[in-house]
Amino acid sequence: MTEKARYAVIGNPIEHSLSPRIHAAFAEQTGESLVYERLLAPLEGFRETLEQFFDDGGAGLNVTVPFKQQAWEMADRHQPRAARAGAVNTLWRENHGILIGDNTDGAGLVRDLRVNNDVTLAGARVLVLGAGGAVRGILEPLLAAAPAQVVIANRTLARAEEVRDLFADTGSLAASTFAALVGPFDVIINGTSASLQGGLPPLPEGLTNPATVCYDMMYSQTETAFNGWARQQGVALRLDGLGMLVEQAAESFVQWRGKRPQTEPVMAMLRPD
Ligand code: ATR
């Protein structure tokens, strides 16, 4: 009997990750024979844990907080959409042990917006809040969807300007402080880590109209602080990151197994209405 291909999500902490449930559902749906586990790496021991996993015959890893940048550094080669992001959430080994790094977060976000929620990005005026690793990870696929403009607003303006310069040749990008923002925007994406602690950047009035779509990259069982703000602004379509989580997993699955699973039943399983 051949052994099942082994995958895992590596992070710290990792016990609450939904990825094992998502990938188990994908495997069952597509008839792929694999196991997918949680892998806790010590904060100072990411490299060793990763190397051990692959030396033991592991087939691929998803990478989550706080290791995405280290994963990017460890990859021997990057897929084009991961090269500039400086962050990797998907790893696998090719022939001769070459470690390939990909970032499926942006593709997952764009697919959740466009395919699952029918949001038009082409020609849209898009505001992205935050300029950290999470935002760098999504910018290339977002800009590839041809928005009219993407404004990156950040507490520290210099970081927003850095990100603007890094991606400037791929679309119309601007950097701003929160206070200087002038709305309304068609789509607002929250990529600040403030939302992990229930915080919210200081946002001025007038950023939205009723047709604005608000998207919090964070996922929560209850309404996120950002989506609470959006509700108070009168925004009708408010989304959190569950769809992105499932779609980025599907993109990783495609890379590893060459098959695209259906995401809708998996989202329904994770969030029964
Ligand atoms: P991640 O990998 O999650 O993006 P990061 O690289 O540390 O983490 O970036 C965190 C982002 O959230 C940054 O844009 C940060 O703003 P600064 O660059 O000014 O630090 C933003 N952020 C974190 N806490 C915030 C808060 N309380 N209000 C506004 N922005 C915040």
Image: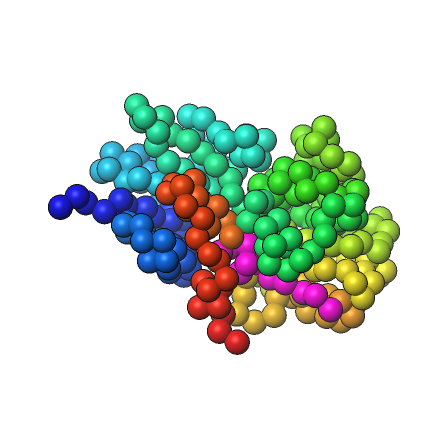
Give x and y (percent) for residue 67. 45, 42
Task: Judge whether residue 240 is colored magenta.
Answer: yes
The answer to whether residue 195 is magenta is no
Instruction: Report the residue at 72% width, 49% height from top.
Output: 121
Q: Does the rendering let one see residue 122?
A: yes
- As displayed, is residue 95 above or below residue 252? above
Could you tell me how many numbered marks the image carries? 0
Q: Quadrant of residue 25?
A: bottom left
| Residue 177 to residue 263: above or below | above
Residue 187: percent from left, percent from top: 74, 54
In the picture, measured across the screen, residue 146 lies left or right of residue 208, that is left
Toward the viewer: 232 or 126?
Answer: 126
- Determine the image quadrant of residue 101: top left
**Spot occupied by residue 215 in the image (x, y as percentages of width and height):** 66, 58
Residues shaded magenta: 236-246
Q: Is residue 153 visible?
A: no
246 vs 97: above or below:
below
Name the residue at 55% across, 54% down. Answer: 244
Task: Note whether 87 is above or below 34 in the view shown.
Answer: above
Q: Is residue 212 left or right of residue 240?
A: right
Q: Nearer the viewer, residue 239 or 26?
A: 26
